[in-house]
Amino acid sequence: MFHRWNNSPKQDHESNELYAESKIKELKGEIGPLSGRSLMYCTDACLRRYLEARNWNVDKSKKMLEESLRWRSTFKPEEIRWHEVAMEGETGKLYRASFHDRQGRTVLILRPGMQNTASIENQIRHLVYLLENAMLNLPPGQEQMAWLIDFTGWSLTNNVPIKSARETINILQNHYPERLGIAFLYNPPRVFEAFWKIVKYFLDNKTFQKVKFVYPKNKDSVELMKSYFDEENLPKELGGKSIMTYNHEEFSRLMVQDDLKCAAFWGSDDKLSNHIGNGHSAVELAPGPVCNETPTT
């Protein structure tokens, strides 16, 4: 966006907002009439994110949004339910944290060293489920999430395949634009550098700038991370003071409740109703525990 010289910050803000509103209106006109879930998805805030991702170019934003709508109509991310992906989460390799960052953003914790399955398709469905869940649990006025990636236990033997990494980046960048606020990669081993040299070329410049490496012995990187997170909330394995262990049973119960919230937001959910109607209660949808510890903060 453009700024006029000698304008006050307030004038610049008002000018930028007027510009954004005009671009949103223009994009709406280009997309044309929508219905159903596509209409629900394409809020003004949503259109703004697509415009921001394409530097306010309406034609490029329209193409990006239309591709996302096609993807959502086939992949149906809002219809994925926890009982379909729960097995992927048994080790806690990816879950929504119980705390937010200093800006109030939802936090996803990723632990690639805890990989427990081989199906890339199921892994992607699990990731998309948690992305949708993260969006569902954003506080009012916040649109982004933060990622904390813990490399404890990571090695080349349990490394994410390049294909999976590329698909993950594609989905995040193209179908959840401007949803990632910051991503901290905590203490990756030296052998990760070879993997990163390949993966980083899949990232657009905006996403690349949001990726930060943190090493416990590098004071500046540690301080940067702490500027985003309260040390009392961060798990000890990520340099914080909180003793936190993933409990699959507790997390499953939480996700089942969120499935009900998701169904209420998007409309009827025969899949969830049928699953509960087949003699299962909401509590019974949660798989058994894989550890006996309960998370503490």
Image: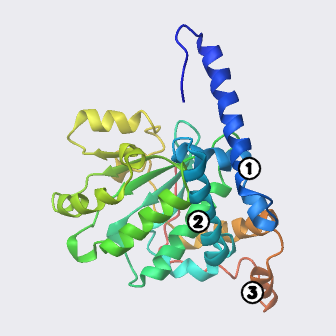
Image position of 259 (left or right of 35): left
Q: Which colour scheme is used?
A: rainbow
Which disc, if any, is residue 282? Answer: none
Nearest the eye: 256 or 163:
163
- For the residues labelled 2 and 3, the Cα–Cα distance comes to 31 Å
Nearest the eye: 9 or 117:
9
Q: Which residue is drawn at 70% across and 42% down?
A: 24
Q: Residue at x 46, y 69 (%)?
A: 92
Residue 225 placement: quadrant: top left
Q: Position of residue 137 (x, y in %)?
A: 66, 54
Which disc, if any, is residue 275? Answer: 3
The residue that label 2 is drawn on is 67
The residue that label 1 is drawn on is 28
Q: Is mark 3 on a helix, strand or loop?
A: helix
**Closer to the eye: label 2 or 3:** 2
Can you say whether 249 is above or below 192 in the image? below
Q: Which amino acid does label 1 sit on?
A: Lys
Sequence-wise, the earlier of marks 2 and 1 is 1
Q: Which amino acid does label 3 sit on?
A: His
Q: Position of residue 59 (x, y in %)?
A: 59, 51
**Closer to the eye: label 1 or 3:** 1
Q: Which amino acid does label 2 sit on?
A: Glu
